[in-house]
Image (cartoon, rainbow, N blue to C red):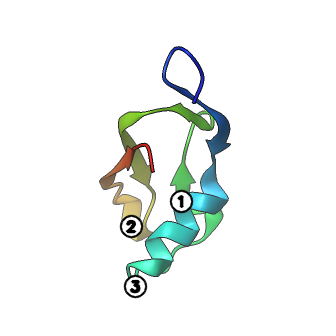
Amino acid sequence: LGEAGSAFGSIGSNKIVELLQEKGIRIDKSQVLLDHPIKTLGAHKIKIELDHGFVPEVTLKVEKE
């Protein structure tokens, strides 16, 4: 982690899809509505675009290992 609590890497749509698949949720990368990669610790709201205009949010908690 950097000095301001930021990660040296980032979490993008591919990683979010992978994490959801580990929980049994199957979505495509294009369904993840992410403005920019996540680079900081904490809770981040992520919108997932589903069929029929349904756009739920999931919370991704980024923590130190």
The residue located at (36%, 54%) in the rendering is 55
Determine the CA span between mark 3 and mark 2: 21 Å
The residue located at (46%, 79%) in the rendering is 22
Residue reaching furthest to the bottom: 24
Q: Mark on residue 58?
A: none
In the image, taking residue 48 as reference, residue 6 lies left or right, namely right
**Residue 57: horizontal and vertical position, in percent?**
32, 51
| Camera-nearest residue between 5 and 40 | 5
Q: As displayed, is residue 18 above or below residue 22?
A: above
**Residue 7: horizontal and vertical position, in percent?**
59, 33
Q: Amino acid at mark 2?
A: His
Badge 3 density bin: few <14, some 14–19, many ≥20, Cα 10 Å: few
Residue reaching furthest to the top: 4
* Residue indicated by mark 1: 16
Quick one: label 2 or label 1, which is nearer the N terminus?
Answer: 1
Q: Mark on residue 24?
A: 3
The residue located at (39%, 58%) in the rendering is 53
Badge 1 density bin: few <14, some 14–19, many ≥20, Cα 10 Å: some
Determine the CA span between mark 2 and mark 1: 22 Å
Q: Amino acid at mark 3?
A: Gly
Determine the CA span between mark 3 and mark 1: 13 Å
**Residue 56: horizontal and vertical position, in percent?**
31, 55
Q: Mark on residue 52?
A: 2
The residue located at (32%, 54%) in the rendering is 58
Per the image, label 3 sits on a secondary structure element best described as loop
Answer yes or no: do the residues labelled 3 and 1 have beta carbons within 8 Å?
Answer: no
Quick one: label 3 or label 1, which is nearer the N terminus?
Answer: 1
